[in-house]
Amino acid sequence: MKYTEKEHAEGLFLMLEDEAPCSACPAIMIERKHNPNYPFETITDEDCVPVCYEFIDMKPDEPGRICPCDVLGREEAIKRTWLALEEKGYI
């Protein structure tokens, strides 16, 4: 499955609205919204992690399949996400 920047931005908004923003991947948030009864996520780390890292301008050689919230810490990851959403014209 091809996971796009546009889908990622949609998922980021869903994630940021959540009570615990770093508790779920934006890709999973999208999947839950569009298919709430499906018991397993079909978007994999291989689909979304590269898009997520690129979205917030992290280098591909930084830790691979780990959420930026875990690498940067929640506050820094959210800060970079918000700035990227602004810079890319999503807000």
Image (spheres, rainbow, N blue to C red):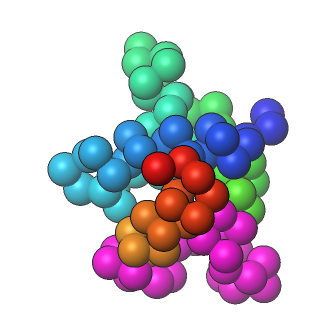
Q: Position of residue 25 (x, y in %)?
A: 48, 51
In the picture shown, does residue 73 fall above or below 26? below
Q: Residue at x 41, y 45 (%)?
A: 13
In the picture shown, does residue 5 fall above or below 65? above
| Quadrant in which the N terminus appears | top right
Q: Residue at x 73, y 43 (%)?
A: 4
Q: Is residue 81 visible?
A: no
**Foreground pick, 57 / 42:** 57
Q: Residue at x 28, y 45 (%)?
A: 17
> Residue 57 in magenta?
yes
Q: Position of residue 76 (x, y in %)?
A: 40, 81
> Residue 44 in magenta?
no
In the picture shown, does residue 89 fall above or below 11? below
Q: Position of residue 48 (x, y in %)?
A: 67, 51
Q: Quadrant of residue 43?
A: top right
Q: In the displayed image of the protein, which residue is found farthest to the left?
A: 19
Boundaries of the magenta span:
53-76
Q: Quadrant of residue 32?
A: top left
Q: Residue at x 34, y 74 (%)?
A: 74
**Foreground pick, 61 / 79:** 79
**Foreground pick, 44 / 13:** 13
Q: How many marks?
A: 0
Q: Position of residue 70 (x, y in %)?
A: 44, 76
Q: Is residue 22 visible?
A: yes
